Amino acid sequence: MSRRILEEELRKRSVFRDPSVLFSDYIPPVLVHRDDEFRWLAQVFRPLLASLTSQRALIVGDIGVGKTVLAYKFGTELKELAREKKIQLDYLHLNCRKDKTVFAICAKLVQHYNPRWPYHGLGPEKLLDMVVTHLQVHDKYLLLTLDEIDYFVNLNGPDLLFFLSRAAEEKGLKNRISILGIAHDRRFLDKLDSPTRSTFMHNMLVLEGYGAQELMDIMEQRIELAFRPGAVDPETVELIADIAARWGNARLALELLWRAGLVADNYGSETVLPEHAREAKSEVYPEIRRDVLADLQLHEKLALLAVVRRLKSSGQAYVFTGEVKNTYRIVCEEYGEKPRGVTQFWSYLQRLRALGLVMLKPSGPGHRGQSTRIAIPDVPLSWLEKEVAKSLKRRAS
């Protein structure tokens, strides 16, 4: 029975071609909208290739702004360029949440250069001494990325960075280890010694969140590789971009895109539609609560129901306020209420936006006047319609 189920699922047609392209550990061939930041890193680490001088820098930013992928892309390409220049530069990217002790980090460094070296029973300083000696003997250099270094320092203190900065000096050798730190919060710098803190503060790159258009560009790049041609509705991409732009989070955008594809496959749809994105958002990051709906005023509920019904009938991610106003009149008639005027109706939409129930967006070029588009980003329309209708029914009874 289980074998048959497995075979049936494998035979199903999918919207995906290679979903792994959407995962957070995928490194794209080209970084979208990070050229300036890549150039900044190139300028900071230029002395490493130009004069074999070690460098230290720090990338700071919120989740999903591309810190890890930027560091990894830079490190691997710098390594390739060094090889072309006959410089033996290694690149090692360690996550400090996984390797969360000084010993674990130093042991990873030892294993990187020789997995057969004994390291159990040795202290971190001895392990690091082995690495420094190896680099010197073999005329090698290392660019070490410490991802989530703020978590590590807050947990363990500043000893690791102190050891890395001083290991070669204490042996009277040239420092061959460059450090690229990645952090969510720069306040960990207060725990470092003055010279180390100063270096990071002077070489600190703060990554800002992505805007909606930038997120659309990032998703379009991945869609070409991850999905079958034409499998993703363009309005689905726009809706997901607008959702994720509230946090500037590309990781969220790609996760929602992947999960929307799973929803489409589950329904046997050949196209990833806006409703699939709404369902994916509600499953992963539920935000709308029933008590918020219950607290709405009568005509706010009627306006919200009009938005839902207009979106459902259109099958689109966005509808225009004028279209919703017409549907609002019909909904008011259905519930025996007199429709309010344009100004009051607009105030209802603003209230719904403030509560996070709808998203309002300028129509942009190609449309006459100053019309506004409306979207419901966070929940499936069928669920929201049912909840609003139930609330209206309770009020009537």
Image (tube, rainbow, N blue to C red):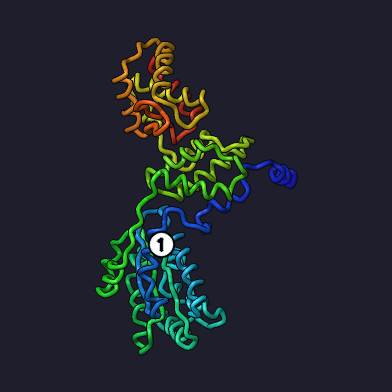
Residue 397 visible, this orientation: no
Which quadrant: the C terminus? top left
Which quadrant: the N terminus? top right
Q: Residue at x 50, y 86 (%)?
A: 138
The three-letter amino acid code for the residue at tag 1 is: Phe
Give the side of residue 356 with respect to residue 267, left or right. left
Give the side of residue 379 with respect to residue 349, left or right. right
Q: Residue at x 52, y 38 (%)?
A: 234
Q: Position of residue 349 (x, y in %)?
A: 34, 26
Quarter location, residue 129? bottom left
Q: Residue at x 40, y 29 (%)?
A: 373
Q: Which residue is mark 1?
A: 38
Q: Residue at x 46, y 70 (%)?
A: 78
Q: Nearer the viewer, residue 134 or 367?
A: 367
Give the side of residue 61 with respect to residue 313, left or right. left
Q: From the viewer's perspective, is residue 234 above or below residue 191?
A: above
Q: Position of residue 162 (x, y in %)?
A: 33, 76
Q: Position of residue 326 (x, y in %)?
A: 41, 17
Q: Position of residue 69 (x, y in %)?
A: 46, 59
